[in-house]
Image: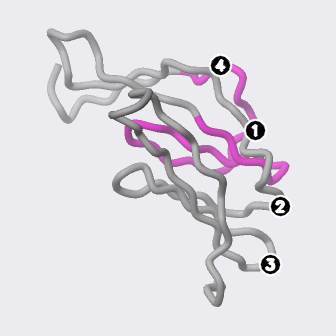
């Protein structure tokens, strides 16, 4: 598969999406203002040129009335709420203790508004 070739995969259990972003994780905004996340992984060991979803979407319960989402480098995620407040969160990978991902809670960035 060419690196420029697109493939589509349905993220089951997620509908009415108005905004999304993805890399090794996915983040989506539904029309009701809720934010949902899921994981991706590369294709088979022989073909590392494409991603496919590997987990069901999970709602970020702390985030309400969101109007925009973004996903940056190192799995840093951001959301903008209807009041113009910017929220950020990330995934922490603990290689020494559990070797598992831990989702950190979103925090508002003081003094940063739309």
Mark 1 and 2 residues: CB-CB less than 8 Å, in contact? no
Q: In screen coordinates, is 99 left or right of 64?
A: left
Residue behind mark 1:
16
Name the image quarter holding residue 57.
top right
Q: Which of marks 4 and 3 is nearer the N terminus?
A: 4
Q: Which residue corresponds to the image point at 75% horizontal and 61% vertical from the top-left? A: 66
**Picture disc at residue 65:** 2
Q: Is mark 2 on a helix, strand or loop?
A: loop
Q: How far apart are marks 2 and 3 (CA)?
A: 9 Å
Front in this rendered view, residue 99 or 60: 99
Q: Earlier in the sequence, mark 4 or mark 2?
A: 4
Q: How far apart are marks 4 and 3 (CA)?
A: 30 Å
Q: How far apart are marks 4 and 2 (CA)?
A: 23 Å
Residue behind mark 3:
83
Mark 2 and 3 residues: CB-CB less than 8 Å, in contact? yes
Q: Earlier in the sequence, mark 1 or mark 2?
A: 1
Q: Which residue corresponds to the image point at 19% horizontal and 11% vertical from the top-left? A: 45
Looking at the image, residue 56 lies above or below residue 25:
above
Q: Distance between the residues labelled 1 and 4?
A: 12 Å
Locate the C terminus and report the quarter of the image it occupies: bottom right
Q: What element carries label 1?
A: loop
- Give x and y (percent) for residue 19: 62, 51
Mark 4 or mark 3, whichever is nearer to me = 3
Q: Distance between the residues labelled 1 and 3?
A: 22 Å
Front in this rendered view, residue 99 or 107: 99
**Picture disc at residue 47:** none
Q: Is mark 4 on a helix, strand or loop?
A: loop
Q: Which residue corresponds to the image point at 64% horizontal and 90% vertical from the top-left? A: 111
**Picture disc at residue 12:** 4
């Amino acid at each position: 598969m060419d690196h420029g070739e697109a493939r589509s995969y349905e993220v089951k259990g997620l509908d009415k999406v108005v905004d999304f972003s993805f890399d090794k994780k996915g983040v989506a905004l539904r029309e009701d203002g809720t934010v949902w996340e899921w994981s991706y992984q590369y294709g088979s060991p022989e073909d590392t040129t494409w991603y496919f979803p590997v987990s069901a979407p999970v709602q970020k319960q702390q985030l309400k009335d969101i109007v925009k989402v973004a996903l940056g480098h190192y799995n840093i995620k951001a959301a903008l709420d209807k009041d113009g407040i910017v929220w950020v969160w990330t995934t922490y990978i603990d290689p020494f203790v559990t070797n598992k991902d831990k989702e950190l809670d979103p925090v508002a960035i003081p003094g940063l508004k739309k």
